């Protein structure tokens, strides 16, 4: 069995080769395989488990009292987009570039949102090993969405902030994206592990300046925020242990990632194979740690089914096709986006077989695929 140096876990799976090199050359940064540091922000790489660790550290965080906005960037390298998503109905005036990994649940969430509202964007598939495509960014995770504003290039980070900021832009109507970013400042602090971390404020809030709204609307919005946060903090954590449940499944998952991320096109063969085999082995191991950390049931499938049933119950309680009623709200889009990241995995097949989520899921897929939200945007 492959024994990976600890640092490899820390930076995770995909930066595999780069780290191999680094590990051999620097002996430092040993943190103990089972330390918290082991599961740093990047462990989840493909399945975004990092989020949790970040939050785990939060209660003990020491505030640095540094509040700031995401700064404009002078330039981004001129890289040919891996894909250009063109929605003819797009009148938003936005010019967006999404830096992403195709199967990262947070990236899938952003795409589900943009596609539903029929917003065009360029995709740059980040090479997860070397990550050159985001070297320009001080923020080292994906998704990053860069929006062209009158002031310059405005990066947005964190999938939920991205969704809220763009939704604010689309529905508020008269604000520049640069201005909107001021509503989402981040606060930096040093956590117990001595790492500098930061958190974006208001990330589940769409900032609309309506004169008044009904009590019912207010409750709906609160519920919508609750489920968006649930997608990030609960649902997402059931994914990794399921997708990487057995060595075989982990390998199958990585092969699927390779297909849909078009790794064959993007990376040399040796690198792709290294990612697939080393990645699958590492994630299989990590999946077990995450299962404990997030208190999943022994049969991890059951935890996935349970959470999906919790979601379905909430949808049904609203009495419509979606949580948002006749059409999806941001809660629906978040849950759908996150789940769509495992669509090609055995876990997803099992999920369809053991729950009734398929009805809601495929309706979502349809309305997102048809960009049904496009007609809701004011132009
Ligand atoms: N809170 C962030 C989490 C993003 C995240 O953890 N992304 C992972 C990929 S799924 C990542 O980029 N990890 C760092 C790395 O790849 O090195 C969000 O919602 O966007
Ligand atoms: C967002 O990005 C900025 C730099 O672009 C970074 O300094 C900050 O830590 C990031 N914040 C979060 C919470 O991701």
Image (spheres, helix red, strand yellow):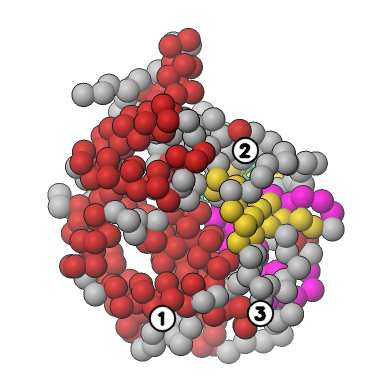
Between the residue at mark 2 and the residue at mark 1, the CA separation in whole angstroms equals 37 Å
Q: Which mark is residue 377?
A: 3
Residue 195 location in percent, x, y? 53, 31
Q: Residue at x 49, y 47 (%)?
A: 101
Please check the rendered image and state whether residue 162 is part of the magenta-colored stretch, yes or no: yes
The relative height of residue 17 versus residue 361 in the rendered view (above or below) is: above
Camera-nearest residue between 280 and 156 = 280
Mark 1 sits on what residue? Answer: 322
Tell me the quarter of the picture where residue 309 sits. bottom left
The relative height of residue 13 versus residue 354 in the rendered view (above or below) is: above
The first of marks 2 and 1 along the sequence is 2
Between the residue at mark 3 and the residue at mark 1, the CA separation in whole angstroms equals 19 Å
Q: Residue furthest right?
A: 150
In the rendered view, does 157 fall on the left or right side of 151? left
The first of marks 3 and 1 along the sequence is 1
- Callout 3: helix, strand or loop? loop
Residue 107 location in percent, x, y? 50, 54
Residue segment shown in magenta:
151-175
Camera-nearest residue between 337 and 157 = 337
In the rendered view, does 374 fall on the left or right side of 261? right
Q: Specify few, some or many for label 2: CA neighbours under 10 Å numbering under 14, 14-19, or 20 or more.
A: some
Mark 2 sits on what residue? Answer: 133
Q: Specify few, some or many for label 1: CA neighbours under 10 Å numbering under 14, 14-19, or 20 or more.
A: many
Camera-nearest residue between 106 and 87 = 87
- Callout 1: helix, strand or loop? loop
């Amino acid at each position: 069995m492959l024994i990976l140096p600890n640092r490899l876990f820390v930076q995770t799976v995909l930066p595999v080769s780069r780290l191999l090199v680094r590990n051999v050359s620097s002996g430092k940064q040993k943190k103990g395989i089972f330390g918290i540091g082991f599961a740093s922000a990047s462990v989840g790489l493909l399945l975004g488990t990092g989020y949790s660790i970040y939050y785990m550290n939060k209660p003990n965080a020491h505030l640095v009292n540094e509040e700031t906005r995401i700064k404009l960037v002078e330039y981004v390298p001129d890289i040919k987009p891996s894909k250009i998503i063109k929605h003819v109905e797009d009148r938003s005036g936005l010019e967006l570039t999404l830096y992403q990994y195709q199967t990262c649940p947070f990236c899938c969430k952003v795409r589900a949102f943009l596609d539903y509202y029929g917003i065009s964007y360029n995709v740059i598939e980040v090479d997860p090993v070397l990550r050159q495509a985001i070297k320009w960014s001080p923020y080292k995770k994906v998704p990053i969405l860069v929006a062209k504003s009158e002031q310059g290039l405005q990066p947005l980070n964190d999938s939920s902030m991205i969704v809220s900021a763009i939704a604010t832009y689309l529905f508020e109507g008269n604000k520049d994206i640069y201005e909107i970013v001021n509503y989402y400042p981040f606060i930096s602090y040093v956590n117990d592990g001595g790492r500098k971390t930061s958190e974006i404020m208001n990330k589940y809030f769409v900032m609309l300046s309506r004169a008044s709204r009904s009590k019912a609307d207010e409750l709906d919005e609160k519920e919508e925020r609750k489920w968006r946060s649930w997608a990030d903090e609960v649902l997402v954590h059931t994914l990794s242990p399921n997708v990487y449940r057995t060595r075989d499944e982990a390998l199958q998952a990585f092969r699927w990632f390779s297909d849909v991320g078009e790794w064959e096109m993007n990376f040399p063969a040796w690198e792709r194979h290294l990612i697939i085999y080393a990645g699958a082995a590492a994630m299989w191991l990590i999946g077990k740690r995450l299962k404990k950390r997030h208190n999943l049931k022994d049969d991890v499938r059951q935890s996935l089914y349970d959470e999906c049933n919790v979601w379905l119950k909430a949808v049904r309680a609203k009495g419509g096709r979606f949580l948002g009623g006749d059409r999806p709200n941001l809660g629906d889009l978040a849950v759908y986006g996150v789940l769509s990241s495992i669509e090609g995995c055995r876990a997803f097949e099992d999920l369809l077989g053991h729950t009734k989520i398929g009805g809601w899921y495929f309706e979502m897929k349809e309305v997102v695929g048809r960009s049904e939200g496009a007609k809701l945007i004011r132009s």
